[in-house]
Amino acid sequence: MALGAPCLAEQWRVQYFYDKGKTEFAIADIQFLSATRGVAVGQIVEKGRHQRSVEVVTSDGGKQWQMIDLKEDPLSLFFLNEGLGWMVTTHGLWRTTEAGKNWEKVPGLSSGIFRVYFTSEQDGIAVGQKKKVEETHDGGKHWNAVPAAAEPPGAANYSAYNWVAFATPKYGMISGFNVPPKRSAQKFPDWMDPEDAVNRRETPHLSYALVTKDGGKTWKASSASLFGDVAKVRFGPDGKGLGLIEYSNSFRYPSEAFRVDWMSGASETMYRDKRFAISDVWLTSDGTAYLAGTLVMGQIRNVVPGKVQVLKSKDYTSWTEMPVDYRAAANRVTLAAADAEHLWLATDTGMILKLEK
């Protein structure tokens, strides 16, 4: 896990920065549908209070962005192509055919969904709380429960599926977790009682996985005891995969990137650092891996925004730190890419940066 010298030929430069008075644009998700079209969704907040839900869209690669109000609070995005996409909100599912410039509510999907993944215009998977996994074969008009999602042990009230991805049209994976309530309830948030947060021990809990090898016709469920939560998995070519595990404040590492071979199912730790809280990973079509997150500012994470940091590797052993605009600070960042040559990242503090080569 060696860290090489910064790569000065490439830099992450700010393309968009929401900087208006005492409000902040907390970007929840960003997707680039092509080298020119992109969408980012989130909420305008003032001192922790929700103000309104908005999106910003671009059709020129991020040179100009247009802000549009949304009717519901957005959670995540998924785009099948340059025009067709879906937005999961706190109250349901929305569909666009114009790259995010218009949205129409899709009826039929129950509440409590975190994200969706469509393999075609008609076929999609939705995952969410209480072991909820549902599938559609008519573009989202009707949804049916996936029976395998209920098989792993653990009460549904303390369980959720939080991520879904397909490596090929046939091979897909859904991750989730079960976290039962602690015997001694936490009295205050971590930032109010930092000593308790640091001394509180991280305990293992169940991690869920659903795997399909036939395009979602059948799913095989499994579970294992694990520290932390599998937050994201990105698949690349030739059986490669890149995943992210996030830990609580009491664990010795804030996060861990791991390598997975989806053909064999084998996985191994790839990168972890006590000073670097990774919040997203990306694997481009040419096999290049990116880790994006923030420098840890103190023992209690996600209280004060930290400097954004991005690492890059071709061999997944030697990592190069990439120059990032000095103004970029956040608690969490999200990566997006149209292809191996066009990459962006968004912060929960209202910045969108592009990798300039």
Image (cartoon, rainbow, N blue to C red):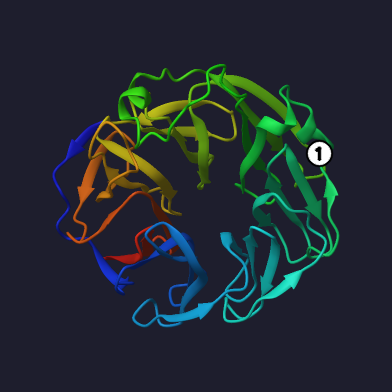
Label 1: element kind? loop
Q: Position of residue 80 (x, y in %)?
A: 63, 65
Q: Position of residue 28 (x, y in %)?
A: 48, 58
Q: Residue at x 60, y 34 (%)?
A: 263
Residue 130 falls left or right of residue 175: right
Q: Hey, which quadrant is residue 202 in on the image?
A: top left
Residue 20 falls left or right of residue 57: left
181 shown above or below 64: above
201 shown above or below 307: above
The kind of residue on which mark 1 rests is: Thr
Asked whether 188 or 302 is in front, the reply is 188
Is residue 252 in view from this perspective? no
Q: Hey, which quadrant is residue 163 in on the image?
A: top right
Q: Quarter holding the C terminus?
A: bottom left
Asked whether 76 or 70 is in front, the reply is 70
Q: Position of residue 99 (x, y in %)?
A: 57, 77
Q: Which residue is mark 1?
A: 218
177 shown above or below 167: above
257 shown above or below 227: below
Q: Residue at x 83, y 59 (%)?
A: 137
Q: Residue at x 57, y 76 (%)?
A: 100
Residue 31 falls left or right of residue 207: left
Counting labels gives 1
Crowd band around label 1 with a 10 angstrom C-alpha radius: few (<14), some (14–19), many (20+): some
Q: Quarter holding the N terminus?
A: top left
Is residue 64 in view from this perspective? yes
Q: Residue at x 63, y 61 (%)?
A: 89
Asked whether 175 or 166 is in front, the reply is 175
Asked whether 309 or 238 is in front, the reply is 309
Q: Position of residue 71 (x, y in %)?
A: 62, 73
Toward the front, the furthest residue is 187
